[in-house]
Image (cartoon, helix red, strand yellow):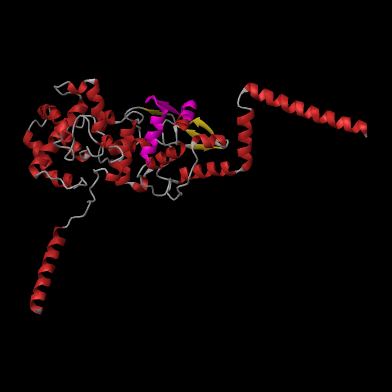
Amino acid sequence: MEDDESHKADDISIKINEMWEKAQPLHTDECCIYRVPHEIRKINEDAYTPKVVSIGPFHHGNEKLLKMEDHKRLYCKQFIERSKTNKLESFVNCVQELEQKIRDCYSDDIKLSKEEHIMVILVDCCFILEHLLLLGPDVSFRLPHLSHYLKYDLLLIENQVPFFVLEELYNLAFPSTSNPPLLTFTRYILPDGISPGNKDVGRIVHFTDLARKHLLLSSALSISECSRDGQVTHLDSATKLREAGVKFEVNEDSKCLLDLQLSGHTLKIPFFRVVDTTEVVLRNLLAFEQCHCLNEAYLTDYICVIDFLIDTDKDVDLLIKKGIIKNWLGDSNAVAKMFNGLAVNILTSNFNKKYSCILKGLNAFCEKPWNQKKASLKRDYCNTQWRTLASIAGIVLLLLTIVQTVFSILQVL
């Protein structure tokens, strides 16, 4: 009996060892393309789902995107045919040698076979390169509505291919150093409100990363020097801050939305245009920070501050009035809802120290009773020119009455 039990234990041990050998880490060091976590994705699934074209394995085979597969193949064929290499086998071999490294870049297990995966990556990468060069034979993507959606499909975190594959294929096609670098063409990918700077963006893992890096590098936040040991502090909404005496102005010294600045009791915020694609861009950049670089989540910090400031449409209206927000959605409540939704289920490590100092400074100002009373007096009695004059006249009349009363008392005495 004991021998049977011993044999069973040995069998179980063998199976457990086999399980250990087959077990794979959740993510490799190369991982940079992620499925958006369910708790974030469920808030607005459309923001993470391509509208026109699938790129990479995650959305490959989506029935709604199948009609664009022929367009991708045409672009791929054209790119290879006009390349200096001009041999399909060379491009296939290039991707084949990189296939495992490419597979390691994705957070989820890819169900495609090695052969299928090579074909998907090759077609998608050559399609992107041909589209960036704007020399494809099919003009469908130049139609405004398709071009509009395609631009933002190429920014989705789930809809990416590793950037090093694009570089390898581009260099294979055009090995001459006289050709402009690939980054010259990728400026097209950048969304509205993010401009390419002159600084070196460093290593790029994909287009979502490219957009985020340009955003951070265009900021005066001094990210390389800005520690993240600041505490996440509560902040009242914009309307409540105004009631406490805080002023709001546009930060005209910077066009980067991250450059918040506190000067005295004036909060300066860069101009920000809210359009129909704003939520898509911000959500995907935020999702990338959440999955890949939470310890450098500077956009997450910004969204948390804006979420503090905007509670209702009245807060949005205040920021619009001050010229900080330009609302192209038409409805202030829609803007408030968008910003409030962006912060849902978002993890935050410590704030960057600059933002933490701004929040602490505002809170300290608002906590002083005299500042609140002064703001209340100004709001109630001096909010217009005529009311100010009337208040001054009332004070003068009150003083004259007091003086007259004093003189009357003195005469009696």
Q: Position of residue 239 (x, y in %)?
A: 51, 34
The reply to whether residue 216 is visible in this rendering is no
Q: Nearer the viewer, residue 87 or 357?
A: 357
296 or 130: nearer the viewer: 296
Q: Along the horizontal axis of the image, is 334 left or right of 205? A: right
Labels in figure, total: 0
Residues 368 and 381: in front is 381
Is any part of residue 68 visible from this angle? yes
**Residue sitting at 13 percent across and 34 percent down?**
123
Residue 235: where, in percent of width, then height?
49, 42
Q: Quadrant of residue 308?
A: top left
Question: Is 328 one of the magenta-colored residues?
Answer: yes
Quadrant holding the N terminus: bottom left
Residue 234 magenta-highlighted: no
Instruction: Identify the residue at the far front of this view.
Output: 412
Could you tell whether 49 is left or right of 200 in the image? left
Figure check: 236 above or below 391: below
Q: Which residues are magenta?
A: 317-343
| Pick the front one: 115 or 277 | 277
Residue 252: x %, y % from top left: 47, 29
Q: Quadrant of residue 124?
A: top left
| Residue 352, quarter of the rendered image | top left
Q: Is residue 256 above or below residue 33?
A: above
| Residue 360, x across and y down, in percent | 52, 45
At x 57%, y 41%, the residue is 366
